[in-house]
Image (spheres, coloured by chain):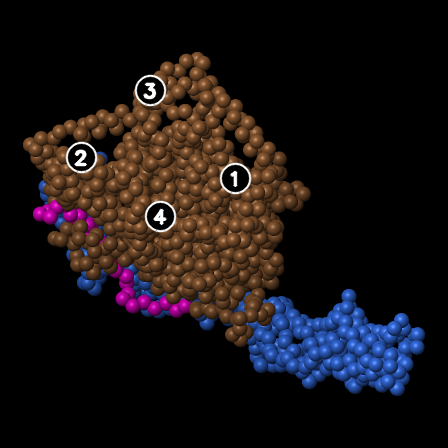
Chain colours: A blue, B brown
Amino acid sequence: MLLAVSVSVSVSVLGSMGPARPEAVRSAAGGLAVTAPERAGAGQAVPVQVTAADGVDVALTAVGSLGMTTDHAVAAGGTATFTLTADVTRAAGQITLLARAGNASATAALVVEPGPPVDPITPVVGARSIVADGTDRSMVVAMPSDAMGNSIADGSPARVFRRHPDGRVDTQDVTMAHLLLWGLLPSGTVAGRNDVWVQAGDATGPTASLDEVAAPPVPFTLAPVDPQAATTTVADGQSLVSIRTSLLADPFGNVEPDGTAVTFDWTGPDGPGTGSAVTIAGVARMSLAAPAIPATVTVTASCRGTVTPAGLALTFASAVSAVPVVAERAPGGIAVVVGPVLQSGGAFVPDGTMANVVVADANTYRTVTSGRLTDGKVQLAVPDDAASGAVTVEVTVLGTVGTAAL
Amino acid sequence: MTAVLEPEAVHRSESPLQAEPESAQGLESSRGWVARHRLLLIALVLVVLFHGSLLLSGSYQRTYDAYVHIFFADHYARSWFSGWDTRWYTGFSTLSYPPGSHYAVAAVSKLFGLQTGFAVVQLGALLILTIGVYRWARIWVDQESAGWAAILLVLSSSIAETVHVFGQLPTTFSLGFLLNALPYADRWVRVGGLRSLVLGVVCMMATTASHHVTTLFGAVFFLGPVLVAALVAALRTPHPDEPDGHPARISRQLLWPLVARRLRRVLPAVTRAALFGVLVVITLVLVVLPYWLYSRSDPITQVSIPHASRDSFLVNLNAGLVFWLIPWGTTLLVLPYALVRGFASKAWPLAASLALLVLLGTGGTTPIPRLLLGGSYNILTLDRFTFWATICVLPLAGRFVKSMVSGTIHDWMVRQLGRVLAVALPVLLLVAHLAVTLFAANLTHYRPFQPGTIDVAPITAFLDKDDHDHWRYLTLGFGDQMAWLSASTTAATVDGDYHSARALPELTSRPVERLENSKYAGVPGIGSLQQFLAVPERYNLKYVFSNDRFYAPLLDASGWTDLGPLSNGIEVWERADVAPLPATDLSREPPAWERYLWGTVPIGSILAALLLLVWSACGSPVPRWPRRLLHSVGAAIRALTTPLRRMRAAVDGKLARAAARVPPAAVTDPPRRWLPGRPVLGAVRAGARRHVTSSRRRRQAAIVVGTLALLTIGTAALVRPVPPTAEQVLTSYYDDLDFRRFGDAYARLDPATRGDFVQYQLDLSADGGLVASFAKLDTVTLSTVEQTPDRVVLRSTRTFLTSLESYDVVDEVTLTRGSGGWVIELPATDPSKPQDQFTSRAGVDLLAQGRRALTSGATATADVLDRPQLTLTDLRAERVSDRWVVVGQVTNVDVDPADVTVQAQMRDPNGSLLASWDASQVIVHKLLPGQSTPFRIEFQSIAGTGAYGTEVDGGVTVVANGAADGAAAGADSGAGSQIAVAAPTPAKADVRGPVEFDPRTITPLTLPADAGVAAVDVYARAVVTPSVNPPGLQVTDVHLDGDTLVGTLRNDSTEEAAVPHLLFSYLDGSGHLVWVDDAYLEHSVAAQHSTSFRVPLAQSATVRDAGVPVSGYAGPAHSPFSQTMVPMIPLPPSTGFASVGVTATSYFRAGGL
């Protein structure tokens, strides 16, 4: 309730700052009369005189926004003199003065007006980030106050400054209303950092930041990071092919922020795959492992709902031309020696490369086992208890098949 | 039973168990005070030297309960008259435990600090207890035996365990006062005297002040025998004006005179005993009156917490060791002697009490304790009876020692075995006794019951800064040191260390002592923790301090962020977007009069008892003015009781007249008395007195020495290492791996084929997965596949427990026998190597920091970032075997990484909230800009309150006996990747220890029968987070193998994916989300490595639309984009789904992008 009184008083005395007015308000009753300025600035000392008979002890009670204080003075020369200190007048609003002496009393009203705005005026921006698509918007709010902490008077003019990402500064005139200053901040089409600050009178304050960010990207493409390497990578199951997106930017050319997720999907010979990467400077990169058998892998990507219109096809040639296999009967089964398996250049295939062995006879016997190559070789023991007659050993390494017969 | 009669004359005197020659008594009384009480003084010195040194060196820090009592003391030290503490259980009443010892520690802590204060008070309690045992034993045995009893107390394994293993303070504190009260009670009943009455009652008040249970049960097992013995003594003590003797034959005319004579003897004692009993009951009520009021208003309605002292000690050998064998120790050897001697003497009430305590202390080994205790059985810790039994036996054990040192037993041994063995055997017994006691006192060194000492200072500093104490916290893996942390801070935890005071239904409804050690508490334990972590905002729970990485995968999967370790190594986890505690936290302080009563009467009783005991020890001097006062009070009492005394005189006169008709002594025979144990004792004594020839003595000595030698050899043979079997080698190998004893594990490998140790360690470190790094090996089952004399192939099934789920790992391992025994042939390791030795991956580093200056103030408004914009799509409410499930997809459409919380609320037609739950594990909580995740929300009831099902298949209800509910489990078994619905393995009926559990179990929501679900609302909210996982997980080569989804997970990042987690989005023919499933992979995936996975396909048979409208609320999104589900592969129609997509995430230990 006190706050509401203060507001109404502030509105009514807009622009009436300055020293306490000498105009007196007299309220006389029972021989007492209170003389005090009608208006005063917040924080000013205000003289108050109460007319009373000499020697009478006069009590002056000031009831204001912050509470109530009482002071006493003995009338001399027909007047008791009081001074309302800055502690009493620091809050804007109305102060009711009540003078009492014995059974006599008198009242007067004093309106305390807020002072001029002082530093800092702290702007608050929200949303703190908006999309730079020309349609999104944010808002700045500030509560400028005078030196005593009173909100400045409604209707007080102020100006909002905004430095755009391109360095351009524009202004917006606003006025104080309901203890607040506010202004809309519509988005532009250039992503980046905005600085926003508010000035009222001679007072200003720090900047608040407003980020304008990119909208979802327009359709983009995929390409190998190293086109030459992409054509020479073979299907060894290990080699990596690095692919990248084109620059991911929205319709206004704003680059997607760092850390934006990009999902890659591909189909390979052993089934589909999916992975993700993040953008750095608008480009996302991902390393794709070569398949273990010769094939073409088609990759697509999506980012913030935008999917690449066309897939990227990567072809992987066979890594191995031949798989030497030696099989012989041994105690407890068949000993299968695979290798040395060489790549096309003559080097061993990578250690750990899987060799899948199928041992079968002419009837129903069929045993599948596998081993990993080390230095291009692996030796496996395959039980042959149920085998009968001629036995065929078929070994597959990186999609190339080698056979042996027993 | 044979009644034995013996001359009454023997029992005329007030002499102890065995009457001493009058000359000896006279000699004893003529000696100086120090000489007479020399054994007591030795005992007191031993208390200080032995227990004092252990206590001051911090033995209590490794105990179970010490920190709990220190916490209570801290509460009173902070606010003496407070009855409410907000630091545990969202607030609890401290009136729930008698405060005497806690106030004592609180008072002493002003001088020494809390921890030293506890040690000082415990030491004081032991001194009082030692004096109490000495004084109480004097009721039953002679002074020297009582002295030995005091020494036995100090050196008993029971006290050592109680003080230095269990850390019980109220037990020792109260028992000391109880035992000191008993001599006064005895004297009061026998001869009266206001001084004895006052001292006895005040000491009982002090007993109650510290531990009301000691008063309750002490009245039965300690006070009861004393009163009975006093009444029996009174019954047999002739009145001064009574003619001596007893008629040889009791005619019908003599029946009433004889009864009247006995009544006349005993009535005054009965009156005094009744008065004492009434006063004890009154003090029991008044001293801790607020406690009784609290108990009445807040009765303990909690689920019983399993305690191993109620197990069968023959089944749970560890419980038998800790709760029975160690406290008894070598005293067990004396127990038969004590029972025989007790029942054969006037100490038979003590012997009867001892026998009952021994029986009750055996826990669940026999059904007798359960039958005797009835409903109390499940809330009592029965080790307390064993503890009291070991105290109860002390007077008789002291008598045994005296006899062995210089009495009958000594003489018997000299006669039977010779002087050397008569000295050597007691010495051997002493050595064994001391060894057991030292073992008990230092048990926590050999077998730590608590985690290593945790420096709580960094944690309290963390809580103090930046308003972190505005939220609740939770500790994991702290043991009872959580109580010390609580005592060191004003921050609150949702957990606590005094389960009787729990108030939250989530805690009281399950047998979980603490969330802190929930991994030892079975399904309710881990399920309870999972729920607290899933919906932490309900409890304003924001921080978890973890000292056990077992919980790390669960924390990460539940959306918690690892902030890294403090300087003490404790890992700090934070949950974003949790509201702080309300500023006006509800305090339920009891009324002021209760608090002031609580803060004055108990501690006042203790102080009064101490002062009166000292006053009594000084000879009870009474200055003149109090004497006058007492005289006046006495006169007033006499005046008030004059009618009663007149009535008593009248009755006595009537009885005297009747008793006078008993014939004179001349015609009497010696009266005979009934002593059931006397024949046994007589037979033993008769045998002992037989003459022993020297040859027989030598023969017997040789037998004893031979027996000892055989025992020694047998013991040595038992402990001699024998070559372990192949099964033992493999089991030990797995144990070594489980406890990270890699050197020992390496030593069990075949030296001929194993690589070097460094390579072995590297091979082990290649897998830091859920099983390898975050699991506890539970069981190992071995079976033989092949066996020859020097080679065996074993199939091992290892069951691992993790905070997420349990795993069975099956391996076939070959062992060969070498010269040093069986060794393990490890299979060849995967020789695969990553493509590049040095890999670079560009990334984005994120940092969230306020712009404000360094200040202790709260976060400025300007520092709060915008909440990221989210969209919810594909929302669907479903019923799965009567359970309520919500699935959907949430997308971060903003440009900042988001820490997402998704909550579903179920409402009735009136809009009233029926239930709410959060997406916990089946979601990716940290989303990059533009990233989506499917989620599944299972509405749950409080864990531990119903039948369980696995969360992964939706929490199938199972019936209590473990058999799956046909309609539910049978039909639902294919609804998830973990098809088998494992009912929690019921604990063995006689074992209440750590039980088996399936961490994937949940407790499905149970709605009231009349509840109608009209709508489901789904809310998604997020805050900006810098803690996102590095991208780079790739799911490749996905294909079907029958009903199994097969694929490869490749980690293209530069950090190890410690606990890979796959989410499966099952879509219908129109591309809409129908079901979300998940699976954790057992192995980690090192950077630039791959691992394969096989996950059973879900089945749609039991998934049906709930028919309830679902609304999603994710806030406005300025530029929402369409993020459609991307199916990876089509599914066969038999599954009921059209296709499935896979989303990969993981717990990255390094964390951060």
Q: CA distance from mark 2 to mark 1?
A: 47 Å
Q: Quadrant of residue A234?
A: bottom left
Q: CA distance from mark 4 to mark 1?
A: 25 Å
Mark 4 highlights which residue? Answer: B130
- At 29% from the left and 32% from the top, the residue drawn is B341
**In the rendered structure, the residue with mark 4 lies on which chain?**
B
Element at label 1: helix
Can you tell which mark lies on residue A113? none
Relative depth, front residue between B643 and B397: B643
- The residue beneath circle 2 is B412
- Mark 3 or mark 1: whose residue is earlier in sequence: 1
Quickly name the residue at label 3.
B669
Name the chain letter of the residue that bears numbered label 1: B
Q: Is residue A371 above or below residue B308?
A: below
Looking at the rendering, in which quadrant would you find the C terminus of chain A? top left
The CA distance from mark 3 to mark 4 is 44 Å
In the image shown, does B71 or B217 lie closer to the viewer? B217
x, y percentage for residue B685?
A: 22, 29
Residue B279, which numbered label?
Answer: 1
- Apparent side of residue A72 relative to residue B452 in the rendered image (left or right): right
The residue depicted at 71 percent of the width and 72 percent of the height is: A180
Which residue: 79% across, 77% down?
A: A71
Q: Could you tell me residue B911's position as x and y percent?
A: 66, 45
User: Looking at the picture, how far across and down is residue B309, in whole percent?
Assistant: 37, 39
Q: Earlier in the sequence, mark 2 or mark 3?
A: 2
Q: CA distance from mark 4 to mark 2?
A: 30 Å
Q: As shown in the figure, which amino acid type bears the numbered disc 1?
A: Leu
Residue B1095 located within the stretch drawn in magenta: no
